[in-house]
Image (cartoon, rainbow, N blue to C red):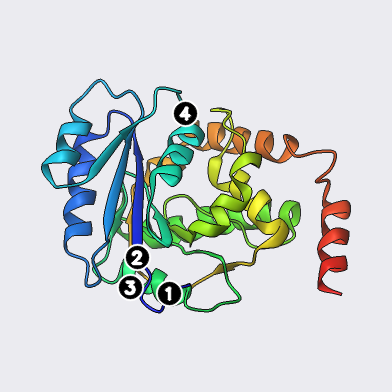
Amino acid sequence: MPQDPTVSVVIPVRDDAVPLAACLRALAAQSRPADEIVVVDNASTDDSAAVARATGARVVFCGERGIPAAAATGYDAAQGDLILRLDADSLPAPGWIASMVDALADPEVDAVTAGAVFYDGPERQRRPMAWAFLGTYTAFAFPALGHAPLWGSNMAFRRAAWENVRDRVHLDPRLHDDLDLAFHLGEDHRIRIVSGRHMRVSSRTVRPRRFAKSFSRGMGTVFAHWPREIPPLRWARRLGRRR
């Protein structure tokens, strides 16, 4: 790991021109700028790609539908030592990139993830709703993984770690790419949850129909790794490695 690692920010998009423009403006205001921004156009029908190119981002095309394929395409295209991932409707604070780079300065850690607050919805409920959503996700994912999960709206990992698991990740659009990646990275790499208030995201994730769909995909992602990754077996393997 270089002392001053290069950073690639990857953003999968599909018909996200409006939120993407705001996300890219926030990335342009970072105290520690990215060395490159990779926008993955997942066959958009709007001008998402044009919006990205207008800001100097590198656009790569992914014709295979779904976030898992789009995210993997972006990670493969990334040239930085560190790969940071967020969504088109994410709004990173000016210190976001710097905070993720600092977290990965620990040589024992290969991937990090952090929380967020909502920037829309009832103002008094934005913070508690975000905590409840992410707390539910972590409570669901931790027993299945045996370690911290990753959250695609705010995460980062070493490119070398991605290359180690690239051939094992699932590209099924019905699965959650971040949870799937956590299954594979967690086998041989340490994932850590870091603190900090560096990200704001849309509350559309917690709308009833979308939340139900998200939960269903979460369950599908867990079951896609069974029977090999049934929790008692996975936990036992992890304990054996530590010894």
Label 1 sits on residue: 2
**Residue 70 at x, y percent in the picture:** 43, 34
Residue at 54 percent of width and 31 percent of height: 213
Label 3 sits on residue: 98
Q: Nearer the viewer, residue 93 or 35?
A: 35
Nearest to N terminus: mark 3 or mark 1: 1
Q: CA distance from mark 1 to mark 4?
A: 33 Å
Q: CA distance from mark 2 to mark 4?
A: 28 Å
Secondary element at image label 3 = helix
Horizontal arrangement in the rendering, residue 15 relative to residue 162 (left or right): left
Label 2 sits on residue: 6
Q: CA distance from mark 3 to mark 4?
A: 29 Å
Name the kind of residue labelled 2 in the image: Thr
Q: CA distance from mark 3 to mark 1?
A: 15 Å
Secondary element at image label 4 = loop
Q: Comparing marks 2 and 4, which lies closer to the viewer?
A: 2
Q: CA distance from mark 3 to mark 2?
A: 12 Å
Name the kind of residue labelled 1 in the image: Pro
Q: Are marks 2 and 4 in contact (CB under 8 Å)?
A: no
Q: Which mark is residue 238?
A: none
Q: Which mark is residue 66?
A: 4
